[in-house]
């Protein structure tokens, strides 16, 4: 008899536990629905700011203003239709990728990957920025050490948002990124990139002269820096390594007081025939 009573008590506890679980679940669902309805009721027709989250430090106010202009302002009605319209408008902004937009109680929040320009290219009188994915961006003043890239083959009309298929341009941007890293590490207050007028790629892969320097950096004072082969290809052309080229270039730059200053008509980084040049002896 005691066993039967104990069994009934255990069964009753199980039933009560099930009831409690379902009761708590139902309460949570009700609270969620109530909260959603409350937000919709209390924030209907209320407005709030468009907030961009996790904006990179290099993005300046002028660029942010440009994006706000593209979507039609800074403040919007806090509802899903407004968020959807903003998301669609942002899709047409070449500067942004991987866009997500959501409504919150304090505004409409947008997250995106910002395309950072690395170089500049020209087609006729038109200039474009270009990012690491070879996506073209419209040109306007930015405080970044951007370098022109010349000698690339562009046989299509260019416009912002176009993604190019240009291996020579991609190679130039890889070198620009490498120099930018060296600047941050070695010369943060006097970046070498700001002394470079353009990267010359007309002899990419030796298409004009196989034995000549495939890549050249042209300084603002007219000095030609013969970089040589494409990155990682130095051994194929019996040149010194990319690491040695960087060391030689930045040693020369430091010896010149962080200015190339026309001390040498050209700087040959391709071989180790000579020692690193000094400001008083050409290379």
Image (cartoon, rainbow, N blue to C red):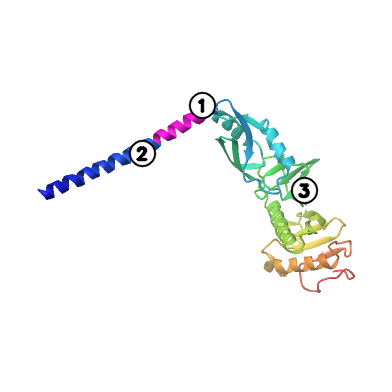
Is 66 positioned to the left or the right of 268 in the image? left
Evaluate whether residue 4 shows in this view: yes
Residue depicted at 33% across the width and 37% down the height = 23
Residue 100, percent from left and from top: 57, 39
Q: Residues within 10 Å of mark 2 (few under 14, many from 20)?
A: few
Residue named by callout 3: 143
The dot on residue 41 is 1
Residue 259, percent from left and from top: 85, 61
Q: Which residues are magenta?
A: 29-39
Q: Nearer the viewer, mark 2 or mark 3?
A: 2
Label 1 and label 2: CA atoms lie apart by 24 Å
Is 95 positioned to the left or the right of 19 in the image? right
- The mark nearer the N terminus, 2 or 3, is 2
Residue named by callout 2: 25
Residue depicted at 51% across the width and 28% down the height = 40
Evaluate whether residue 212 shows in this view: no
């Amino acid at each position: 008899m005691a066993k039967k009573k104990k069994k009934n008590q255990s069964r009753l506890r199980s039933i009560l536990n099930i009831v409690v679980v379902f009761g708590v679940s139902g309460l949570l669902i009700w609270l969620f629905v109530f909260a959603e309805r409350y937000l919709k009721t209390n924030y209907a027709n209320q407005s709030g700011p468009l907030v961009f989250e996790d904006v990179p430090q290099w993005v300046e106010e002028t660029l942010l203003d440009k994006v706000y202009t593209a979507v039609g302002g800074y403040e919007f009605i806090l509802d899903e239709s407004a968020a959807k319209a903003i998301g669609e408008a942002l899709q047409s902004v070449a500067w942004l990728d991987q866009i997500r937009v959501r409504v919150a109680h304090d505004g409409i929040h947008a997250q995106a990957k910002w395309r950072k320009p690395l170089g500049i290219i020209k087609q006729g009188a038109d200039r474009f920025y270009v990012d690491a994915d070879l996506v073209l961006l419209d040109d306007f003043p930015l405080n970044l050490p951007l370098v022109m890239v010349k000698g690339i083959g562009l046989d299509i009309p260019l416009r912002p948002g176009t993604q190019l298929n240009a291996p020579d341009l991609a190679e130039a941007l890889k070198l620009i990124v490498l120099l930018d890293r060296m600047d941050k590490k070695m010369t943060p207050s006097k970046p070498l990139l700001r002394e470079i007028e353009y990267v010359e790629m007309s002899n990419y892969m030796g298409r004009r002269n196989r034995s000549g320097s495939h890549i050249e950096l042209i300084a603002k004072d007219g000095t030609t820096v013969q970089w040589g082969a494409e990155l990682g290809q130095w051994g194929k052309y019996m040149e010194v390594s990319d690491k040695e080229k960087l060391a030689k270039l930045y040693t020369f730059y430091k010896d010149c007081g962080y200015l190339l200053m026309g001390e040498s008509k050209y700087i040959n980084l391709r071989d180790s025939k000579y020692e690193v040049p000094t400001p008083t002896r050409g290379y």
